[in-house]
Image (cartoon, rainbow, N blue to C red):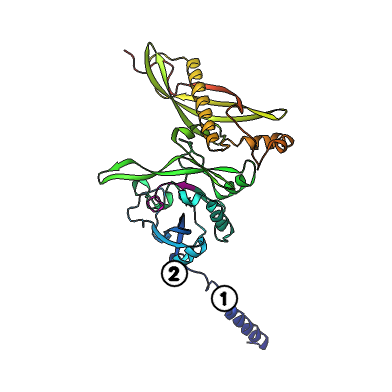
């Protein structure tokens, strides 16, 4: 070998020794992964619940896996969120990775007195977390909610809180909200946001007993300065019809037919919402125009499309106004009417607004026009499937 080749070989050998490779990277199976975080506030201290999962033993979400490791919940308290989290670090035997955190759950106490704003700011500033983290609130025990397992022993990663849009095509009662949407909504008129309200439901049962599942039961109204309260159950029904993101919902109403009363459930699809502010001097009113399709899945007796249109229109208007008036009781602009005026006529908004909101009363929605594009009887006609 020539002297030149020897020099080149020695140089390459030296460079190879200096390469660091991946020696400082932690192996995935030697880490704990945060899936969700719950936050409570009591006695001037934050309580943090950390839901962790080990991906080394998690199966695919599409198949049942009885051996999949259940989630484990860690709990610690501190004067700040960060202090509580650092206390949890001391009790762990592996490094914690935050990049897969999918949801943040607030207790009732944590939502009040601006505590939620402080918590949101903490997770937005933390480098490892993402903006696409779903946000919820509850009055139930945080620990109980976090310990709920998906139905049919599915992987914990397929839980509803981590994947709230899985059933949105079938039922859009409450629109999920992530950190990014929450911050944008709180920074823009009307400076209020609807946070999905979660409770525990026991509608399912196995041979071993009842199964618990998380349940969307309404919304909590959070503003940049305070927590306004909750709209639950029927009080929150109108939110679904004032939202373009609604994929499908249902309306159930009483229908008189041949001197007998019966109930009919109608699916509502392809919802299109338009809100037009009408400014008159120092007053503003809002005209709402809704367009959607309906599908009938089962009924008795003879039924006409115009009959369905009339009843559906009446019920939708009733639910919209019911929710709007419930919001007014807690000084909440649940349909973000202030923002509609802000986008349409900012000069008028500036004259009327106070802290980003305009004055509202039960007459602020002056008109609700409903146009039902199609009344479909499903796979059949408007005649009964089974006749005498």
Q: Is any part of residue 65 visible from this angle?
A: yes
Q: Hey, which quadrant is residue 129 in on the image?
A: bottom right
Residue 326 locus on image (x, y percent)? 51, 33
Residue 380 in magenta? no
Residue 90: numbered disc: 2
- Span of residues in magenta: 136-145
Foreground: disc 1 or disc 2: 2
Q: Is any part of residue 246 visible from this angle?
A: no
Q: How busy is the neighbourhood of tag 2: few (under 14 within 10 Å), some, or many (20 plus)?
A: few
At a point 59% along the width and 48% down the height, the residue shown is 225
**What secondary structure is found at the residue carrying circle 2?**
helix
Q: Is residue 2 left or right of residue 203?
A: right
Query: In the current view of this chain or complex, which residue is farthest to the front?
Result: 43
At a point 74% along the width and 36% down the height, the residue shown is 347
Classify 268 as above or below 153: above
Foreground residue, 101 or 341? 341
């Amino acid at each position: 070998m020539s002297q030149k080749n020897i020099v080149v070989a020695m140089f390459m050998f030296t460079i190879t020794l200096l390469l660091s490779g991946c020696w400082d990277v932690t192996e995935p199976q030697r880490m704990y992964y945060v899936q969700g975080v719950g936050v409570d506030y009591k006695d001037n201290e934050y309580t943090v619940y950390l839901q962790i999962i080990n991906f080394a033993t998690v199966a695919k979400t599409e198949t049942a896996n009885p051996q999949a490791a259940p989630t484990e919940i860690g709990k610690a308290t501190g004067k700040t969120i960060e202090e509580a989290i650092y206390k949890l670090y001391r009790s762990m035997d592996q490094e914690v990775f935050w990049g897969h955190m999918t949801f943040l759950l607030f207790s009732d106490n944590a939502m009040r007195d601006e505590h939620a704003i402080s918590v949101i700011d903490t997770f937005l500033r933390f480098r490892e977390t993402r903006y696409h983290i779903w946000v919820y609130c509850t009055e139930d025990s945080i620990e109980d909610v976090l310990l709920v397992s998906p139905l049919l022993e599915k992987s914990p990663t397929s839980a509803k809180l981590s994947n709230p849009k899985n059933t949105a095509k079938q039922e859009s009662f409450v629109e999920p909200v992530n950190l990014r949407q929450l911050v944008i909504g709180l920074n823009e008129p009307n400076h209020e946001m609807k946070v999905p309200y979660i409770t525990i439901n026991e509608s399912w049962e196995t041979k071993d007993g009842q199964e618990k599942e998380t349940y969307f039961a309404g919304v909590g109204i959070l503003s940049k300065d305070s927590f306004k309260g909750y709209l639950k159950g029927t009080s929150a029904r109108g939110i679904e019809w004032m939202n373009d993101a609604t994929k499908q919902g249902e309306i159930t109403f009483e229908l008189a037919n041949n001197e007998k009363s019966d109930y009919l459930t109608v699916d509502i699809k392809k919802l299109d919402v338009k809100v037009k502010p009408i400014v008159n001097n120092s007053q503003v009113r809002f005209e709402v125009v809704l367009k959607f399709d309906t599908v009938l899945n089962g009924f008795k007796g003879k039924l006409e499309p115009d009959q369905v249109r009339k009843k559906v229109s009446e019920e939708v208007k009733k639910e919209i106004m019911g929710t709007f008036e419930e919001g007014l009781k807690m000084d909440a602009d649940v349909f973000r009417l202030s923002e509609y005026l802000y986008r349409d006529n900012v000069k008028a908004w500036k004259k009327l607004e106070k802290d980003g909101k305009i004055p509202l009363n039960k007459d602020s929605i002056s008109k609700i026009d409903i146009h039902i594009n199609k009344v479909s009887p499903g796979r059949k006609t408007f005649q009964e499937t089974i006749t005498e």
